[in-house]
Image: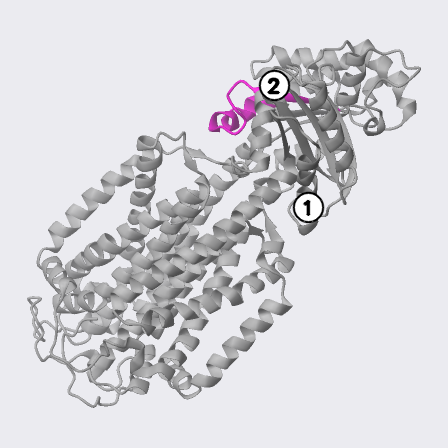
Amino acid sequence: MFAALGRFTVRFRWLIVAGWIVVTVVLTVSLPSLSSVEKSSNSQFLPASTASVKAATLNAPFRSKSTRDATFVAATSAGSLSPADNAAIDRAEQTMLSIPNVVALTDQGISANGRARTALIQLQVPSSDGSEAVAATAGLRSTFTTSGAPTGLALHLTGPVAQAVDQKSQNSHTQTLTELLSILFILALLFLTFRALLAPVIALLPSAVALFAAEPIIAASTHVGVQVSDLTPILLVVILLGAGTDYGLFLIFRLREELRRGREIHEAVSFSLCKVGESITFSGLTVIGALITVVVATFGLYKGLGPALAIGIAVALVANLTLLPALLAILGRSTFWPRIPKPEPPRHGMWGRIAGKVVGRPVWTLIVGLVIFGGLALSMLAYTPSGFGDPAAPASSDSGKGQALLVANYPSAAADPTSLVFRLPTSVWNDPQLLATAGQKLTRSSQFTSLIGALDPNGTVVAPDELAQAHQQLTGLGPVSRLPDSVPTGVSLSTSTYNAYKASSQFISADGRTIRFAATLRAGPSTSTAAAQAIPGVRAAVTRTAHQIGATASGVDGYAPVAYDVGAISGGDLMKIIPIVMIVLALLLAIVLRSLIAPLYLVVSVALSYLASLGLAVLVFELIGGQDGINFVLPFFMFIFIMALGQDYNILVMTRIREEAHHAPIKEAVRRAVEATGTTVTSAGLILAGTFGVLTATGNTQVQEIGLGLAAGILLDTFFVRTLLVPSVVVLLGRWNWWPSALSHEDHSGDGHADGGVAGDSPLPGDLGPVGGCEATEPSARPLAGVGS
């Protein structure tokens, strides 16, 4: 099949290049963009049956179904807001009402310390980070400069919409920077590797084209259930530019090797694709297989991310099997200019010397490797997951600064609340004393350090009967959002009671049947791991209170409960996915290697690499860096990518060892294979690790941890597992590596040089006529044995 594909790509090379250009343009123009279908909230990936999702539904009366919220916050650096400050705030709020898509603005009064003032803004936009939300956010922020704010008065826009807009802007910046730095890094490394002008560009080009083609396909796949997170575009760039370029390297290095043997360019392209096409295909299939298996996950982030990236890898695989050989056939030997390959005496480089030492002392090599990797894996004992909630907007953004003002001037429950929600059988206005009873019951529990409810909504405490009296006098004047800033004429209420009633709409629903409390958890900030771990106790306290006040339903909504549910579900998913992925990879390895023995230790070797890499991440971030944990997605991503991408190099090395083992003793076969593939594996590993490493310089903490963890894992796998430990095991097992295939019964102990020395003039597989289905014609010059890549 690959022989035929090689001939086809050479013969129809111009048509293939034109086809890729047309298809990519059509896909980009006719299908939606990837950014238009992203989801940024972890809660959006939770099943509907999850407790936090049910609580969010219960909390819905405090969230408009047709509008989305933003918070305007103003604060002075002086002692308290002055009349001039308040006048500027009034002007800003009045102007905000004229901004398109702003449907309501409710001033929530001055903070208890007198230094800050907030307003809740309702926006009629279809999504929190869509184009309408971006335009509305920009319009609202433009009012800051026209309000005539006195010196020392800071105006900021925060809240869900503003934070989503700022986070999306940050993600877009991260993706663009990742693409640029990844391309520059890959090109620089390939220039050093090939010392040629065109080869680096040709190696990268198919993967870049695949990236442009894959994005709209993935976006369109959301119509059939694929979910796209804000991590998907960033990881797609890294995977396609990194792994995709690796596949190209497999072919280009083999092509250079065949040109050094004296083959004509078109024959060399066809023959090279025939020899490594299977390795490239099964390398891609291992990644695709590992990613597809995550559809069994419950957590939507995993379930959607796997198929999305699998689509990208599939497109990159097709591009490297068709577009790349077509480009190589068109450009010919000029691909490698000015170092054009030509027949030359055999050269034995660093990897040949290393391979000679490995095959000479396989037991010691294996023992030392196991001790090092085992030691790193022990660091996993200190592993603590974190980062379960939604990523916060950058602290330097306008919404980040606004959130900081809320934290500084309002109780922490108001700035970062965990909502305790109760659904009552009748309106609370029939028995307002329930508000006090519920507050007292919750306060007496050991779970909360502060509690804000309808009786103290803005820092001013009011009695239940005072609030009820306010409701009785004001309910006929229309919705709370339309009440004037000052006490209306004819209403006998104090200013403090009037402002408290206006703010109570955050805690009592319009029909009076749902009440809410904003709580500060005793375990710590709601974004902390300790807070997430305390959620079972918090939910128990809320349930008890619900029974005592006769509520028909209750729930806990906010960052911490979502974090707890995400952690529980994602951890269970990982334990479910691990054995499935290992079985899928073992089956694919068994097919490509025609062996039942080799897949066993190859899968174990990558699992050991995964454990050591995760241990190294724990060591760097927790034990040395002092973080309270590492992001919960890191073990999942490291397992999927290291297991799958590690098998890429396994396949390349093992298929070459098998190729050499057809006519050489096992030690000589290993030496030749490692020498021939060592530079390829090293270059591919550095490219992939480098593209992951780019994330450490471009993203937030979550992205940085993913980047560093995966980069370290790929480097460990490349330089130690694939080139040292696996060859050692192969040498120790000998012919048993290939059981039960016919190769396991062949004896080549008398062929070549069994001591692992230089092969001299012993024939190479490519010189023996049709090998593995490849139609090898005699090259124009005599074949050279032992030529490395």
- Place of residue 107 in the rendered image (x, y in percent of width and height, measured from the top left): 75, 26
Q: Residue 613 versus residue 604: which sits nearer the camera?
A: 613
Q: Residues within 10 Å of mark 2 (few under 14, many from 20)?
A: many
Q: Is residue 353 left or right of residue 246?
A: left
User: What type is the residue that disc 1 sits on?
Assistant: Ala
Q: Is residue 216 left or right of residue 326?
A: right
The answer to whether 319 is drawn above or below residue 427 in the figure is below
Would you say residue 318 sits in the magenta stretch?
Answer: no
The answer to whether 160 is drawn above or below residue 339 in the figure is above
The span picked out in magenta is 515-540
Which label sits on residue 133? 1
- Name the quadrant containing residue 35: bottom right
Task: Say if residue 32 shows up in the picture.
Answer: yes
**Cα gap from disc 1 to disc 2, whole angstroms:** 28 Å
Q: Which residue is mark 2?
A: 411
- Place of residue 231 in the rendered image (x, y in percent of width and height, measured from the top left): 51, 49
The answer to whether 303 is drawn above or below residue 335 in the figure is above
Which label sits on residue 715? none
